[in-house]
Amino acid sequence: MNGLHLIADLHDCRCPPAHLLDAAALESFCVASCERHGLTVVGRLFHSFTDAQQQPAGVTGAVVLAESHLALHTWPELRGVTLDVYVCNYSADNSARARSLFAEVIASFAATHAETKEVARGHLSSAVSGD
């Protein structure tokens, strides 16, 4: 269960609007980025939303990795993005790969402000209760 979870809220993104609206292009970018950083893509799903006037209104996407996942949601009306990258470090330490992927994806949105968090996950203590 040992892993690393990287979380970001990106504000005032200065990327081209299509980067926040085009599910196919965003999927292609995210899959290529995961592969470029040595992570193993095993699945993906990206969905475009539309508003009441049937205009593009954001994208939710996930890339499923053998090591875990990359997930994001775009908020074009706010020029914002929520992002998380999680990797399992059970059989190998994938932390450096996750951090470099995370940095690349954040940079692609050209946010003027990014709130990021890094959470170590699943560290078991030596005494595991049966609760």
Image (tube, rainbow, N blue to C red):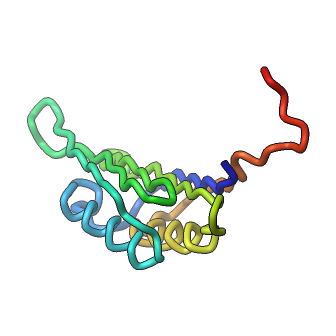
Residue at the extreme top: 131
How many numbered discs, if any?
0
Place of residue 27 in the rendered image (x, y in percent of width and height, measured from the top left): 27, 60
> In the displayed structure, would residue 23 be above or below residue 95?
above
- Where 35 sits versus 90, above or below? below
Q: Position of residue 78 (x, y in %)?
A: 37, 46
Identified at 12% across, 42% down, the residue is 55
Relative depth, front residue between 104 and 95:
95
* 118 left or right, relative to 98: right
**Quarter that holds the C terminus:** top right
| Residue 53 located left or right of residue 14 | left
Q: Residue furthest left?
A: 54
Q: In which image quadrant can residue 95 be found? A: bottom right
- Residue 75, given in percent of the width and then of the height, sits at 35, 46
Q: Residue at x 71, y 45 (%)?
A: 122
Q: Residue lying furthest bottom in this view?
A: 36
* Residue at position x 65%, y 56% in the image: 4
Q: Is residue 125 left or right of residue 1?
A: right
Image check: 29 left or right of 35? left
In this view, the residue in front, 13 or 131, is: 131
